[in-house]
Image: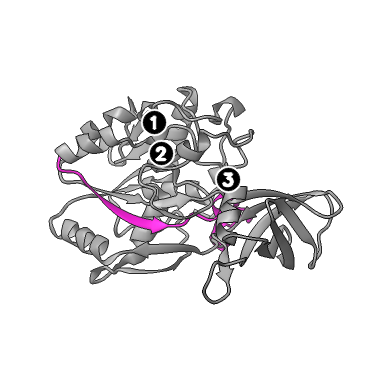
Amino acid sequence: MKACIDDFDYPLPPELVAQYPVEPRDASRLLVLDRQTGEVHHAGFGDLPQWLDAGDLLVVNDTQVFPARLTGFKDTGGKVELLLHGLPQPEGNGGVPKKARALAGYRARRRLRPGQVITFGKGLSAEITALPQPGTMEVRFRCDAGDVGQKILASGEVPLPPYIRRKAEPSDQNRYQTIFARRPGAVACPTAGLHFTDEILEKLARQGIKTVNITLHVGPGTFTPVRLSNYTEHRLAPEYFSLSAEAAARLNEARRQGKRLLAVGTTTVRVLESCLTSQGFAAGEGWCDLFIYPGYRFKAVDRLITNFHLPRSTLLLLVSAFAGRELIMQAYEKAVKARYRFYSYGDCMLIL
């Protein structure tokens, strides 16, 4: 079949795009898709343990979203909105850093130029040092006193996705974060993990289902649509990942014992598939740009928990590679008819 992104479009009523999460976390709905039989079952996330087998190994992304969205003003008074692409890198040798560099996306009504200064209040400002491509800037942050990194975090807000059409609220600081979050660095949440609670994990542990952590700091590229008709020509922006020696050892032991690996989210899938070699999982860290689309042969992942994804997105291509395009599109059609909630704060799927 010719690779055409038009084959991965689907209609979605706008009211099904979740603007707030359900409470509690595990009150979300769960659509279960069996790849072997093609059957679809409707359940609640609290029912997850009954769909899994004793000994399955749960693999989660422990990245933590940081307050990457900042609003500042030029000296003319014009507003500039920034979305940092990663944690700012401090400058200087020793002492409390007063300067830091960062790459950011931006929105402004008028054209910007290098040398302009954006002020954020509380003694924090940023000079535009370069505009490497449309909508992207390199900046050098400065602060009058204190740690510039802490000032940036204090000035930022939760970077909610663009399809959540409201301002971030105080509750989002907790709810747009998984219970696994330990390592700051993401500008978007690995949302498949949002449904888990301590109670769910306790139930899984009683079934002998343990948890292993990996890290992938989700970047802004996760929201970039595939604009090329031939999606195989699309390129993913690299994202930092880490697989510890302890995690690699546990993954390899699980494979030796014939246990299934259940990936929580597409980011986890990409790390697992990137790190599996002919000798097993290899510990390491670096930059992951693995783009998975139909035709890819999975080596590591046996089962997948994932949210419902945007049309024409790399995430929809990945789940279609895992379960098959026809099954995924049929499941999405059923989810729309059953009024599931879509995207980051929405419901999820379990693909067996």
Quote the CA–CA distance across marks 3 and 2: 15 Å
Q: Is residue 225 magenta?
A: yes
Q: Is residue 72 left or right of residue 190?
A: right
Residue drawn at x 40%, y 42% is: 178
Residue 142, image quadrant: bottom right
Residue at label 1? 25
Q: Quadrant of the C terminus?
A: top left
Q: Nearer the viewer, residue 249 or 121?
A: 121
Residue at label 2? 194
Question: N-terminal of the two: label 3 or label 1?
Answer: 1
Q: Are marks 3 and 1 in contact (CB under 8 Å)?
A: no
Q: Secondary structure at mark 2?
A: helix
Q: Is 145 situated above or below 47?
A: below
Direction left: furthest residue: 257
- Report the number of discs: 3
Q: Secondary structure at mark 3?
A: loop
Residue 103, image quadrant: bottom right
Q: Are marks 2 and 1 in contact (CB under 8 Å)?
A: yes
Question: N-terminal of the two: label 3 or label 2?
Answer: 3
Q: Which residues are magenta?
A: 207-234
Q: Is residue 296 left or right of residue 36?
A: right
Q: Secondary structure at mark 1?
A: helix
Q: Is residue 5 magenta?
A: no
Q: Are marks 3 and 2 in contact (CB under 8 Å)?
A: no
Residue drawn at x 44%, y 39% is: 307
Q: Position of residue 176 (x, y in %)?
A: 48, 40
Quote the CA–CA distance across marks 2 and 1: 7 Å
Q: Position of residue 107 (x, y in %)?
A: 73, 50
Residue at label 3? 159
For the question of whether residue 52 can be seen, the reply is no
Q: For mark 2, does the 10 Å Cα neighbourhood hold few (<14), some (14 to 19), or many (20 or more) residues? A: many
